[in-house]
Image (spheres, helix red, strand yellow):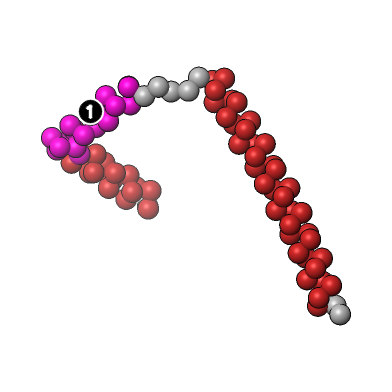
Amino acid sequence: MIAVGSGLVALIAAVIAYRSNKIHTFVVEVCVELSKVTWPTRKETWSQTVVVLIVSVIAAVILGVYDAVWSHITDLIYNV
């Protein structure tokens, strides 16, 4: 029932947006601007993805070591 209600609200919003000149103009301008965007190539996207994965793994290792060291120090302090 919620899905039907949500779909109905979306349909009403779409009809209102379609009839509004301001919204129509905005959507057309957005499409024009998106056509001007220089999208990255598949190779560029892949290389950037690899960089993000490597940096994420390095950060995870650094934080893991940091956590282990501080956990050990905390255990030494509390188990005096």
Return the residue found at the far bottom: 80
Q: Is residue 78 left or right of residue 44?
A: right
Whether residue 74 is situated above or below residue 13 in the rendered picture: below
Q: Amino acid at mark 1?
A: Val
Majority secondary structure in the magenta region? helix
Quadrant in the rendering for residue 73: bottom right
The residue indicated by pointer 1 is 28
Magenta-drawn stretch contains 35: yes
Quadrant in the rendering for residue 56: top right
Residue 52, horizontal then vertical, whole percent: 60, 36
Q: Is residue 45 left or right of residue 29?
A: right
Magenta-drawn stretch contains 19: yes
Quarter holding the C terminus is bottom right
Residue in the image at 67% along x and 46% along y:
59
Q: Is residue 35 left or right of residue 73?
A: left
Of 10 and 57, nearer the camera is 57
Quadrant in the rendering for residue 34: top left
Q: Magenta segment, which residues?
A: 17-36
